[in-house]
Image (cartoon, rainbow, N blue to C red):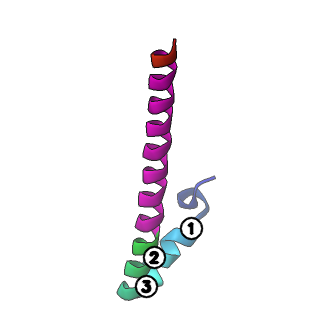
Amino acid sequence: MSAAKTGKSSPLAEFFCKASPETKRDVFIVAMSKAIASQRDVLDKAEAIKMARKAEKASA
């Protein structure tokens, strides 16, 4: 059941209503840093797969 149906605020909604702008900024920076790191990891893995396939074709 959603928060709208129960009348309760979600923890995320509570955070955005009550947290200071500085705290929100700090949380945003941490979240974005983690997202960027995750995206870089995906790109690195994709590049490794690409290079492995290229090596397989060259040796075949």
Instruction: Assess disc 2: are there few (<14), some (14-19) or many (≥20) residues with their C-alpha within 10 Å of its C-alpha.
Output: few
Residue 19, given in percent of the width and then of the height, sits at 45, 84
Q: What are the residue bounds of the magenta stretch?
A: 31-57
Give 39 or 12, whichever is nearer the viewer.
39
Q: Are marks 1 and 3 in contact (CB under 8 Å)?
A: no
Q: CA distance from mark 1 to mark 2?
A: 17 Å
Give 9 or 11, whichever is nearer the viewer.
11
Decide: is 36 above or below 25. above
Q: Quadrant of residue 5?
A: bottom right
Q: What residue sits right under mark 2 in the picture? A: 27
Q: Indicate left or right for 37 with 11 as reference.
A: left
Q: Quadrant of residue 32?
A: bottom left
Farthest top residue? 60
Q: What residue sits right under mark 1 in the picture? A: 10
Q: CA distance from mark 1 to mark 3?
A: 18 Å
Instruction: Assess disc 3: are there few (<14), some (14-19) or many (≥20) residues with their C-alpha within 10 Å of its C-alpha.
Output: few
Q: Nearer the viewer, mark 1 or mark 2?
A: 2
Q: Magenta includes 44?
A: yes
Residue 23 has which mark? 3
Q: Residue at x 41, y 59 (%)?
A: 36
Q: Give SS at disc 2.
A: helix
Q: Magenta includes 43?
A: yes
Decide: is 59 above or below 22. above
| Secondary structure mainly formed by the magenta segment | helix
Amino acid marked by disc 3: Thr
Q: Residue at x 43, y 51 (%)?
A: 39
Amino acid marked by disc 1: Ser
Q: Earlier in the sequence, mark 1 or mark 2?
A: 1
Amino acid marked by disc 2: Val
Q: Are marks 1 and 2 in contact (CB under 8 Å)?
A: no
Q: Give SS at disc 1.
A: loop
